Image: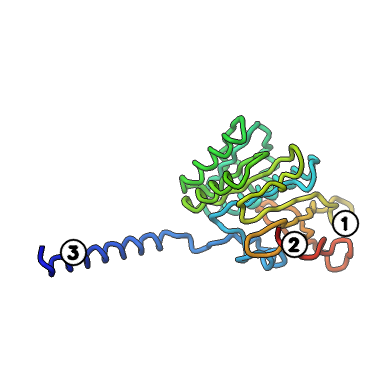
Amino acid sequence: MSRVGSMGRALRLERLRAEVRAIAAAGQDPAAVLPFGVSDLDARLAGGGLADAGVHEAAGASDGYSDDAAATLFLAGIAARRAGRRGTVLWVVARRDLFAPGLAQAGLDPGKLLVAETGRDSDVLAVMEEGLRHGALAAVVGEIGRAGLTETRRLQLAAEEGGTMALLLRRWRKGDPLGEPSSALTRWRIGSAPSVPLPGPGVGRACWHVELARQRGGPGFSLLLESCDAQGRLAVPALSADRPDQADRGDERQAA
């Protein structure tokens, strides 16, 4: 082959590569993060929100049912807002204990929910990995007791490959579920708190102690927030500026 022919072939190959890069760039989601829409919260998150293609974990602040429910609804709200962009959410459970009306109150439409029931943590993780790599889901939620660095690293790689958010609900079994090392980008503890008193009779919106125990690229922190509404959105209690007991529940602490 002549030198001119070789140069022409190399030029065509480079043009083809450029076209492939352009197509890939056009197909990427321009929103790299999912913000909460709460300035007090987003301003403290590295990147201003949760990485779309990443693993995020949450656990109840204690092993009580109310804290476990708060952590479940916290992740449901995130999945709901993600589903508003992308569609279906895959929720992988080890036992059949999801309460669809409760998830709907946190914004997660049952019509956008696909539930997979497995028997063991290893099965939950395997199904999650397949769902993340598929790339067509809004988010993949998994309920687990144990998952170490290797397992969460595999989920992170799958999330990056499929451009899908992975949400791990860490169940209390033996000790603090966030005490185990993890590759998750953010790790949250969610605890129930008294609702803000209303000016008249009635029960106010539920509140949560939201603690970011660890985040990659930034310090942890703790806030008192109102629980998810019907669109999956959190809010700062309206009276927080006037009530010392509703102020920020902890100084910013260095990430572990």
Secondary structure under the numbered disc 1 in the rendered image? loop
> On the rendered structure, is 205 left or right of 133?
right
Q: Which mark is residue 230?
A: none
The amino acid at mark 1 is Pro
Marked residue nearer the N-terminal end (3 or 2) = 3
Circle 2 is placed at which residue position? 221
Can you say which quadrant of the picture contains the C terminus?
A: bottom right
Q: How would you rate the neighbour count of disc 2 (Cα within 10 Å): few for under 14, some for 14-19, many for 20 or more?
A: many
- Mark 1 vs mark 2: in front: 2
- Mark 3 vs mark 2: in front: 3
Residue 119 % position (x, y): 61, 30
According to the image, what is the colour scheme of the structure? rainbow
- Between 85 and 176, the residue placed more toward the observer is 176
The Cα atoms of the two marked residues, 1 and 2, are separated by 25 Å
Secondary structure under the numbered disc 3 in the rendered image? helix
Q: How would you rate the neighbour count of disc 1 (Cα within 10 Å): few for under 14, some for 14-19, many for 20 or more?
A: few
Q: Is residue 130 above or below residue 254?
A: above
Secondary structure under the numbered disc 2 in the rendered image? strand
Q: Is residue 128 above or below residue 203?
A: above
- Between 180 and 96, the residue placed more toward the observer is 180
Circle 1 is placed at which residue position? 197
Marked residue nearer the N-terminal end (1 or 2) = 1
The amino acid at mark 3 is Arg
Q: Which mark is residue 9?
A: 3
The Cα atoms of the two marked residues, 3 and 2, are separated by 56 Å
Residue 73 % position (x, y): 70, 47
Marked residue nearer the N-terminal end (3 or 1) = 3
Q: Residue at x 70, y 53 (%)?
A: 188
Q: Residue at x 66, y 44 (%)?
A: 169
